Image: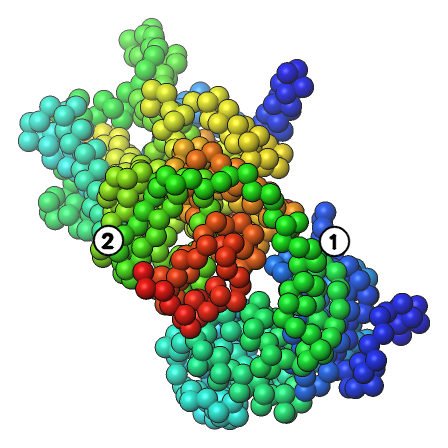
Amino acid sequence: MASLDSAIAHEKRSIDRKAIIQKFAALAGLVLLVIAFSLTSGAFLTMSNVVTIALQTSTIAFIGIGATVTIITAGIDLSLGSVLALAGVVAAMAAQMGVPVPLAFLIGVATGGVCGVFNGLVITRLKLPPFIATLGMMMIARGVALQITGARPVSGLPSSFGTLGNDSLWRVLTETANGFPKIVFPGIPYPVILMAVLAIIMAVVLRKTPFGRHLYSIGSNEEAARLSGVKITKVKIGAYVLSGLMAGVAGIVLMSRLVTGQPNEGVAYELDAIAAAVIGGTSLAGGVGTISGTIIGAFIIGILRNGLNMNGVSSFTQMIIIGLVIIGTVWIDQLRNRR
Amino acid sequence: MSAVISGQAARIPEGEVADPILKARGVVKRFPGVLALNNIQLELRRGEVHALCGENGAGKSTLMKVVTGQLQPDEGEVTYKGQPVHFDTLQDSEAAGITMIHQELNLVPHLTVAENIFLAREPKKGWFVDRKKMEADAQIFLDRLKVNIKASDLVLSLSVARQQMVEIAKALSLNAEVLIMDEPTSALTESEIDQLFAIIHELKRQGVAIAYISHRLQELGRIVDRVTVMRDGGYVWTKPFDEVTVDDIVAAMVGRSLEQQFPERVSTPTDELIFEVRNLSGVRNCRNVNFTLRRGEILGFAGLMGAGRTETARAIFGADPKTGGEVLLEGEEITIASPVDAIKAGIAYLAEDRKLNGLSVKMTVKENITMANIEAVVRHGLIDKAAEAQAARQSIAKLGIKTPSIDQVVRNLSGGNQQKVVIGKWLFRESRVLFFDEPTRGIDVGAKFAIYQLLDQLASEGIGVVMITSELPEILGMTDRVVVFHEGEVSGILETRKTDQEEIMQYASGVKRMSL
């Protein structure tokens, strides 16, 4: 019995070690970035900048989680950015019409879910490749967002519409001698809290539920999954609905931050989302990927942008650097898998 | 040439005098943990068809890979046209005149015949492909084979047999002097085989040396001059075909009697019916199929490739649509519209191609074992890690799966262990009837024995076992009864101990037919 226990313990150790090494590459990159930027810019590692980074990263993280779910099934969701815009403007229009803000937000998120159902049905019923189906949705959602708003920002929203995107938990203020408020602790922005909560929920869904296991099995070998009794259609539609819901969440958070509905928001954001997933170790061939990896990927992109900005690097150069980072990380990942 | 090697080699009297174009001597090839080739010799002469016989895993393909430069031998040498040669790649050996036609044809379906024949060596006019010259040249080689194929035809519009002709034409265009054919007739109809053999005779006349790998021993007599038999990576003998019988070849291939190759059966058939199929028809190659399965029995499905055995199993399992018929499990009719229904009823289908249809090779042993029954380890909506690990460990212990851990990715296991993982998946589901489609394909001899033992054990536990196999010795060694398929229909159901390979082949080829 003792030997069995020790065998199990040994087995566990070796697995843990392997998993740690796998995650280590991306995480090490993240740590190196933080060290490099804190050395080059004194303002980088301040409390307010850390909060800013987390806030900026949350949008990439929301849609990155959505992208991860569909890529694990060997699919793709190119409609994330457009669905984000549609969900946001729908929420804004609802609030403008007098719908209570929390309900308006729910309507916005649900709009994302509806887009996901449409994607899922086109992929499973019409049997179109996910690339084509979501490319279509990318244009449809953007078109609808522009059409219903007349391509104009939706403004005149109640101030409570801005709470989700702009307020923080545990913000500590003191009054200075001349009566102005002074920020002692900026607090944790609501979008960052939402990001953490959703990331944990989605990680549990992927790792612990039968649905999550089925996502991986479809991405790994769809025919084997079907012959094992996995309900392919349901699970795939589920994946695209989750992706749409995450785009919806990103949409309401972003529009709340702007306190307007911007139909032109989020153009090409899906590419950031896919990049975050891929940097975090998700394989475009399907069957492989984790939420924690994607969050790390999202932070790598967020920190690169923020740090390069603080060092005065132009946005064009930033694009070049991020492009190289994507190519580099995936290359390293492939080298490791090839052994 | 080393005197030591020629000194210890078996003497082949005429071999030395005739004109050997390709010779392999003392070839040894080791893979991690396996001696794949052990002191192999082979000698091909110009204008002969030389059959290479041996069971799966005997080393035929490995030897051919060594000869064509896809693998490098650890010991021994290959001589070609009297010179020791060393090919680094397949392209090297092709350039020298040795061409191999694989069982899975290597053509690009969306290109034309001419484009395939001259792929990567297109005739050019300036910077552009000289399409006219390419098609004219391709047509010359096609015409030499006397086949009615146009060089401008798309490959995907051709039948498998005609695609094979294109491969041969491609070999001719490479000025092949040695042609290696791996199971060329396995997907062909009788008349297509006649056509292929006519071409082989023609090539022979032109002085091409042909190495011919086939499991269909009966047809060898029509074309073969000499036979080399291999067994478990070793060389057995080379003899002129006239001097041996098919039985001699089989005995040399197997190297032991059927009793040693298969385990002593523990299970015994009872009279109790556990599964029955009546008048089943499916959309693909399955018409009016009837059979019964008794408790404790192992039932075999025999037939040629494309006879409808796999299609029948897939239709029963709901993987392909049915057009009619009834399926009865323990006397009760069940409706199966999809694999989900079949699995619920307790029917499992272990697909023919493990990696394509049976396993998720990127996932772990544990995840594969629980895949068909994940609900069994779910508590409050979440997968219970401990319960899942326990389930996986039980399967590993029961089936003797050799894996460093339950979290090992299945891709890294050997073929035999992968097959056991698939079996573990269905046992964890507590399946009551299991269809094994080619369960021992591509796994080594020792692992086969373990799989046979497992099938027997399942049958003795009262689980219905149906074994679909193309290996007739497996049918004879393991089953109680055999259902023989011919062109999508059952042509006969035979008591295994009252039949033999010959009779089964007569039913399989449609020569004989039972009224059922």
> Which mark, residue A163?
none
**Label 1 SS:** strand
Residue at image location 41% in from the left, 70% down from the top: B512
Q: Is residue A21 visible?
A: no
Q: Amino acid at mark 2?
A: Gly
For label 2, the residue is B325
Question: Would you place residue A267 above or below residue B494 in this image?
Answer: above
**Label 2 SS:** strand
Query: In front: mark 1 or mark 2?
Result: 2
Q: Residue furthest right?
A: B3
Lateral position of residue A224 relative to residue A45, left or right: left
Q: What is the quadrant of the C terminus of chain B in the image?
A: bottom left
Name the one closer to the observer, B230 or A134.
B230
Residue at image location 47% in from the left, 34% down from the top: B461
Q: Is residue B310 visible?
A: yes
Name the one closer to the observer, A266 or B203.
B203
Q: Residues within 10 Å of mark 2 (few under 14, many from 20)?
A: some
Q: CA distance from mark 1 to mark 2?
A: 49 Å
Q: Quadrant of residue A39?
A: top right
Question: Would you place residue A271 above or below residue B165 in this image?
Answer: above
Residue at image location 50% in from the left, 33% down from the top: B366
Lateral position of residue A212 relative to residue A233, left or right: right
In percent of width and height, residue A1 lies at 64, 16
Q: What is the quadrant of the N terminus of chain B in the image?
A: bottom right
> Which mark, residue B35?
1
In percent of width and height, residue A270 lies at 34, 45
Chain of residue at mark 1: B
Q: Quadrant of residue A148?
A: top left
Q: Amino acid at mark 1?
A: Leu
